[in-house]
Amino acid sequence: MVKSKIAISVDSSLLKLVDSKVDGSVIRSRSQAIEYFLKKGLQEQSVSIAVILLKGEHQKFAMKNVKGASLIKKQIELFSKHGIKTVYIVTQHTKNMNLLLGEISDSRINVELIEGQSRGNADALKGLKEKIINSFVVMSGDTYNDFDLLKMIKKHIDSEKLATMGLMTREKTHSYGTAILDGDLVVDFQEKPKHFSTNIVNAGIYIFSPEIFEMFEDITSLEKELFPKLARMKQLVGFFNYGEYLHMTD
């Protein structure tokens, strides 16, 4: 993104406050701090963009019937009824592409299919950086969630953290990423660990602040790399999805 240099006059006490927010990690300079808080002040207190990360080999699950409609239609329906205006489906080209396009062709909101090769789901998100300026929802393409998404969005906005992860509890956790909580904060996250110390698991839906893209350098996997890093930084909030959930690949 091309950035312009400008000269502005700022009250000295306000400048000291801005400088106090430079932590050397998330916000690394005065310029970045000013840009961050200006963007935060201008953005609407709502989320209008969602991303579905759909692996090419999981497109067959996107076409499966869930409660009278395909999974992909149900996912878009969840977003539509909670105020999402645009959905990006990030996937790879397969023989099922025309079927997938047919499923989204009559959507009531804007749905765009974005094809691309990537090394992992975090890598797939990088390609959307120029399209996103506010907080956004991300959902795994092989999961069905039906819950109050607006409550999760409010939790994310109020927390002022980089990410919010949807959570649920499961007796058998071997096929899930697991989270350790301290209050609302996820303080440890492991993707499918061999030894389980919690029954709190990843529900496959997240909300990210746009600054999350600053964390993506040398990161390809959300679950294996990004979430553990955010947990160590105390920048990952947990939200329990009290609703319906299906993991189509179980």
Image (spheres, rainbow, N blue to C red):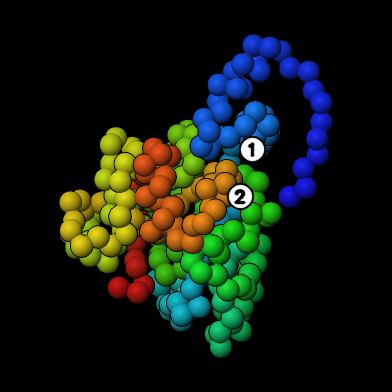
At x 17% / y 51%, what residue is drawn?
Answer: 197
Residue 79 in sight in this render: no
* Coordinates of residue 201 in the picture (x, y in percent): 29, 55
* Amino acid at circle 1: Glu
Q: Is residue 239 left or right of residue 109?
A: left
Disc number at residue 178?
none
Q: Is residue 21 left or right of residue 226?
A: right
Quadrant assignment, res 238: top left
Q: Which residue is mark 1?
A: 44
Q: Which residue is mark 2?
A: 48
At x 49% / y 41%, what residue is drawn?
Answer: 162
At x 29% / y 35%, what residue is drawn?
Answer: 183
Assess disc 1: are there few (<14), some (14-19) or many (≥20) residues with their C-alpha within 10 Å of its C-alpha. few
* Amino acid at circle 2: Ser
Image vertical order of residue 163 relative to residue 119, above or below: above
Residue at the extreme bottom: 95
- Label 2: element kind: loop
